[in-house]
Image (cartoon, rainbow, N blue to C red):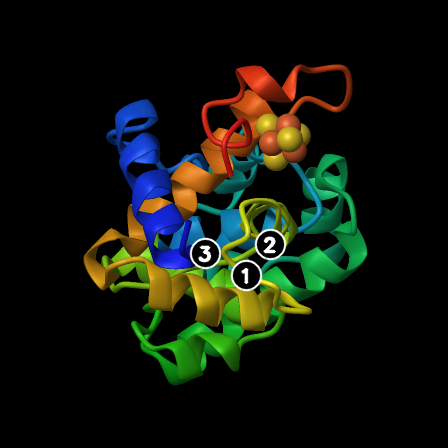
Amino acid sequence: MKKQERADRIGTILDELFPAPEVPLRHGNVFELLVATVLSAQCTDARVNQVTPLLFDRYPDVKALARAEVAEVRDIIRPCGLSGAKSMALVGLSSLLVRHHGGRVPASFEALEALPGVGHKTASVVMAQGFGVPAFPVDTHIHRLAHRWKLSSGAGVIATERDLKKLFAEETWNRRHLQFIYFGRTYCPARGHVVENCPICSWV
Ligand code: SF4
């Protein structure tokens, strides 16, 4: 089977399994989405969702977080891990948003990636899920699935993102990346499973 045929079939299966995948990080606006996405680095979405209500209660908007004591933020977000770097990033990016962007989150990859703690993947999540701009955020889980399904042999996430963007129609990117994530969570247990029962891995 050619790579494009495989991608088309995978797309059809993912649409059947996860027709309307929800954004996993809870948020009330784009700023909260940005904060939650920064917190989600090397942390589960479930853990982030436990921490953010407390954080947004204490710092309800960008100005409040820009004025926050880094040590206080660190204490609240400690369960997410990397709390030292993440707390500095959150206070730093909030202060930059207030100073350079009128307190709003910019709808631009370049401007987002210039913020502390925001790399290409985080910017892609915010562009896709916050602004509805087509993007294909690739993390290590998506990277691994793309390799397993022979859709990419890219050495890193950037090459995999490029390959996946070529194989899937642009209007599907925003739900595809979520569908990959939900597939991994549903079908890829840590150990002990029957590959033959997997709706995709059984035939790729
Ligand atoms: S379903 Fe199983 S074989 Fe397929 S990617 Fe997940 S862990 Fe690997």
Q: Residue at x 55, y 52 (%)?
A: 150
Instruction: Measuring from the top left, give residue 16's x and y in whole percent.
Output: 27, 26
Quarter containing ligand 1? top right
Q: Secondary structure at mark 3?
A: helix
* Residue 161 vs residue 131, the one in the foreground: 161
Q: CA distance from mark 3 to mark 1?
A: 28 Å
Displayed quadrant of residue 158 = bottom right
Q: Is residue 25 visible?
A: yes
Instruction: Measuring from the top left, give residue 181's x and y in whole percent.
Output: 50, 38
- The kind of residue tagged 1 is Ser
Circle 2/circle 1 CB separation < 8 Å = yes
Q: Secondary structure at mark 2?
A: helix
- The kind of residue tagged 2 is His
User: Does residue 23 appear left or right of residue 145 in this picture?
Assistant: left
* Residue 10 vs residue 23, the one in the foreground: 10
Q: Disc 2 designates what residue? A: 143
Find residue 62 and name its label: none
Q: Residue at x 52, y 82 (%)?
A: 114
Crowding at mark 3 (Cα within 10 Å: few <14, some 14-19, many 20+): many
Q: CA distance from mark 2 to mark 1?
A: 8 Å
Q: Which residue is most to the front?
A: 1
Q: Earlier in the sequence, mark 3 or mark 1?
A: 3
Q: Disc 1 designates what residue? A: 152
Depicted 122 relative to depicted 24: above or below: below
Q: Secondary structure at mark 1?
A: loop
Q: Earlier in the sequence, mark 3 or mark 2?
A: 3
Mark 2 against mark 1, which lies toward the viewer?
1
* Residue 163 vs residue 52, the one in the foreground: 163
Q: Disc 3 designates what residue? A: 34
Q: Is residue 28 visible?
A: no
